[in-house]
Image (cartoon, rainbow, N blue to C red):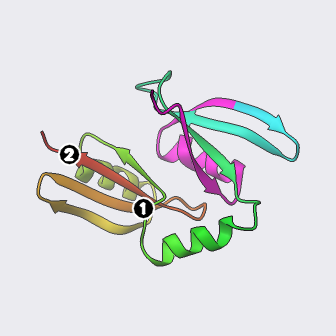
Amino acid sequence: MRIHITSVFVDDQDKAMRFYTDVLGFVKKHDVPVGADRWLTVVSPEDPDGTELLLEPSGHPAVQPYKTALVEDGIPAASFAVDDVQAEFERLRARGVRFVQEPLEMGSITTAVLDDTCGNLIQIVHAKA
């Protein structure tokens, strides 16, 4: 068994697509109309057949209270692995990304947390071997 698709709820699918592709560097995998919304997924360019991230519309009434609670408590909605948290932090900050947690070493793990502009906190992480 493998994880095929995971998702983050986004306030605006177009805005999310721009952020996740143009800023973070993912590539679009699927963009299929589904009524007023779309089945919109991105993948890592390093693993185009790997796990997809669904940019899921936030339309369900339970979503906004859930997202608000996570952000208020500083809990990331997703975590993305990077090779070098400090380098990625500097690259993204230079592109205007707002971080709510700068790189933090915790033993063998380094993390940073950013605002995805679509209502979520996203963690970037590197674990030393």
| Residue that appears at 75% across and 67% down | 61
Whether 103 is drawn above or below 80: the answer is below
Whether 120 is drawn above or below 20: the answer is below
Answer left or right for 71 relative to 28.
left
- The tag earlier along the polypeptide, 2 or 1, is 1
**Badge 1: how crowded within 10 Å, few (<14), some, or many (20+)?**
many
The picture quadrant where one finds residue 28 is top right
| Residue that appears at 49% across and 78% down | 72
Residue 44 spot, x, y in % from top left: 46, 32
Is 102 a magenta residue? no
Between 56 and 86, the one nearer to me in the picture = 56
Whether 80 is drawn above or below 69: the answer is above
- From the image, tell me which residue sits under label 1: 114
Answer left or right for 121 relative to 87.
right
Q: Quadrant of the N terminus?
A: top left
Answer left or right for 118 relative to 75.
right
Residue 24 spot, x, y in % from top left: 47, 45
> Dot 1 lies on which element?
strand
| Amino acid type indicated by mark 1 | Leu
Is 6 a magenta residue? yes
- From the image, tell me which residue sits under label 2: 127
| Residue that appears at 77% across and 41% down | 38
Which stretch appears magenta? 1-30
The picture quadrant where one finds residue 66 is bottom right
Q: Quadrant of the C terminus?
A: top left
| Amino acid type indicated by mark 2 | Ala
Whether 123 is drawn above or below 46: the answer is below
